[in-house]
Amino acid sequence: MDILNIKTFLTIVETQSLSKASEKLFVSQSTISARLNALEKELNTTLLKRQPGKKLVELTPKGEEFIMIAKRWTALEKDTHTWISKEPPLRLNIGSVDSINIYILSTLLNQMMSSGTPLTIDVSSHSSIQVFDLLESYDIDIGLTSRLIRSNSLLGEPVFSEGMVLVSSSTNSHYKDKVHPQDLDVKNEIFSDWGPNFQVWHDYWWDPAEPKKITVDTAGLILQFINIPNTWAIVPTNIAHAFKNRQPVNISELLVPPDERIYYKVIHRYPKPSSINALKIFQELLEEFIRNHPYLKVAK
C-alpha cells in the first residue's frame, strides 16, 4: 500500500476538504483526487462520499474505520525510518558462575551503567561446564569461570586472582586474626567447593571422609549459618569483605593458605561479528576494574 496515498487520506480527514488538503501538501487538487482514488481502488471500498457542491468532505463508515488503520501505517513508517537511522545496539551476553556474578561482576556492571557505558548487557549464572557449553553454541558471548575446560573452539586465559581467608562469627566464635589450618576442627566447617586446587589443599589438612558441619553450593548460604557458635568457612577475600559489609564477621588470615583462586575469561575462537565491539569495550573495562580493585590481582 502506498504510504503517500495513506498520508493524503489523513490530510483530507484533518482538513475536511480536498482543496485544503492540496494546499497543505503543495500539490494540485487533481493529484489529491487521484491519490484518493488509487487508495480506494486498492482497498476495494469507498472512503469518502462524493457530494458536489459540498465544501466539507464526509466519510463513509469504512472511511471512519480506516482512520485508525491509516494512523498505524504512518506510525509504522516513522518507526521504520527511526530504526534504519539508528546504530545497532552494542549487546553482550555474559555467562558466569554465581559467586563471580554476585560478588564481582555486579559491582563492575553497576559502575558501567552509572557511567553511561553504551552496552546492553544480559547476565546469567551457570556452572563452569554450562558456561563452556553456552559459549560453544553462541548462546553467550563471554564467560567468566573459576576453572578451565579444554575446548578447541574456545579461548580461555586467566584474568585475575584473589587470596583465600577464613571467616567466622564476630560474636559466636573465638578465632584469632591469624589461624593455622591444623587448629581448625573440620566438624565446624561450612564447606564450599572453590575448585580442584582448593580441594587438594583441603584434603591435605583434613580427612575427606570426616563429616563437615554443613556443605553449601553457593557462597551466599554461608552467611545463613556463620552465626552458629564456632563455625568457620574459607572464602575468597572479596567475598569475605562483602560478608563483613552485611553482618558482623571476623576475617582471619590463614598461616598456610590455599593457592589463590584464579578466574578465567573465556570467549569463542570465532566470536559473532555483532559482538566484537561490545567484547572489546567490556574487556577493557574489566581490566581497568581489576587494576583498581582492593582485593583482586591481575593474573600473571
Image (cartoon, grey):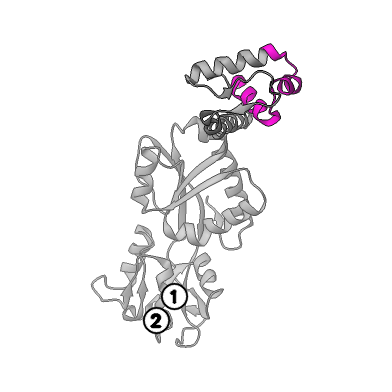
10 Å neighbourhood of mark 1: few (<14), some, or many (≥20)? some
Count of numbered badges drawn on the protein: 2
Report the residue that reaches farthest toward the left. 209
Q: How far, Cα to Cα, is label 2 from label 1? A: 11 Å
Q: Earlier in the sequence, mark 2 or mark 1?
A: 1
The amino acid type of the residue labelled 2 equals Thr
Residue 29 sits inside the magenta stretch: yes
Q: Secondary structure at mark 1?
A: helix
Report the residue that reaches farthest toward the front. 53
Which stretch did the figure color magenta?
Answer: 4-30
The amino acid type of the residue labelled 1 equals Leu
> With respect to residue 199, does 252 lie above or below?
below
The residue positioned 34% from the left and 49% from the top of the image is 129
Residue 204 placement, left or right of 42: left
Q: For marks 2 and 1, give the one nearer the viewer.
A: 1
Which residue is tagged 1?
Answer: 223
Q: Nearer the viewer, residue 143 or 254?
A: 143
